[in-house]
Amino acid sequence: MLVNEKSKLMFDFEASEDLKEDFEKFTKNFAFMSTAKKCAVEAVGTFFLCSSIALQSVGNPVATGLTLAVMIYAFGHISGGHFNPAVTLAVFIRGGIDYLSALSYAVAQLVGAFLGAAIQKEIFRASLADQTAKTSFPHPAANAPFGTALICEAMFAFALAIVVLNVATTKAQEKNSFFGLAIGMTATVGAIAVGGVSGGVFNPAVGIALPAVHGITEDLTLYVLGPCLGAVTAAVFFRMTVDEKELKKE
């Protein structure tokens, strides 16, 4: 795989303040088809990430982190390998993707997550011959205050997003071959560290889809707000600390 191609994808669009101009950029010269391909792989990657979590009888952060790493290595050169609306939000604020593509990515990620959650629910129930069985889904500890769980989700979403921004969107590291492992292991460490408190999701698509297919919605605010807060903070911190030349298109 050409790692430098993966990195360059983050810099192939400069957003402007003109909505009409941005829409034309989005649709002309086969850009629409290019975005469709990127959204397709975002959906597939998120599908497998969500599926790997759904089918775990006992939460296994290593399996989840390895799935994320593998999907990033597989599709990073096409879409950047986000598979997470919070990561897409961070990359958008960083200036690496336009807002129309960011919205398209988020929709694709949600579609992939819901497909994974729904299909694996049926597979799981069929394998047990029990139509009431539930696949694994994230949830905070019963005695964890909302604020505490929110901080945990935001904290490690920050870690995940800042790693993505530094290892996968900078010119200084465009030739590295460890980006997938670094991102996957960050998710693993976060899940091990705070999974017992908040559920360790750091991903709104996964946090929405896995409980929702079982009709469980009480933790959706936690799994949307926490990761998005962490992602926004990471993007702002990145822009404050990165060399200015990293933010300019050559």
Image (tube, helix red, strand yellow):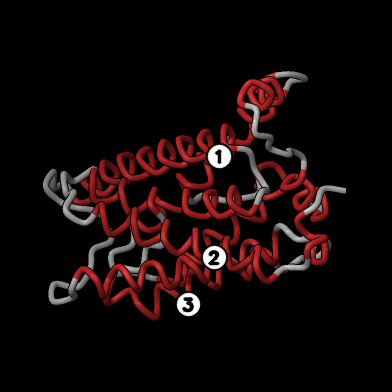
Residue highlighted by disc 1: 102
| Foreground label between 2 and 1 | 2
The residue that appears at 67% across and 25% down in the rendered structure is 26
Q: Report helix, strand or loop for mark 3.
A: helix
Q: Give x and y (percent) for residue 108.
A: 48, 36
Residue 124: image tag = none
Q: In this view, does 41 lie to the left or right of 153?
A: right
Can residue 33 be spotted in the picture?
no
> Depth check: 108 or 224 in front?
224
Is disc 2 in contact with disc 1, using a CB cutoff of under 8 Å?
Answer: no
Amino acid type, callout 3: Val
Q: Report helix, strand or loop for mark 1.
A: helix
Q: In which quarter of the image is residue 161?
A: bottom right
Gap in angstroms between the C-alphas marked 3 and 1: 27 Å
Q: Give x and y (percent) for residue 51.
A: 40, 50
Q: Is residue 181 left or right of residue 156?
A: right
The answer to whether 196 is drawn above or below residue 203 in the figure is below
Residue 234: image tag = 2
- Dot 2, how many residues are within 10 Å of its Cα: few (below 14), some (14-19), or many (20+)? many
Amino acid type, callout 2: Ala
> Depth check: 125 or 19 in front?
19
Gap in angstroms between the C-alphas marked 2 and 1: 17 Å
Amino acid type, callout 1: Ala
Q: Give x and y (percent) for residue 231.
A: 49, 60
Of labels 2 and 1, earlier in sequence is 1
Of labels 3 and 2, earlier in sequence is 3
| Foreground label between 3 and 1 | 1
The answer to whether 53 is drawn above or below residue 21 in the figure is below
> Depth check: 111 or 62 in front?
111
Q: Is residue 245 left or right of residue 189?
A: right
The residue that appears at 25% across and 52% down in the rendered structure is 220
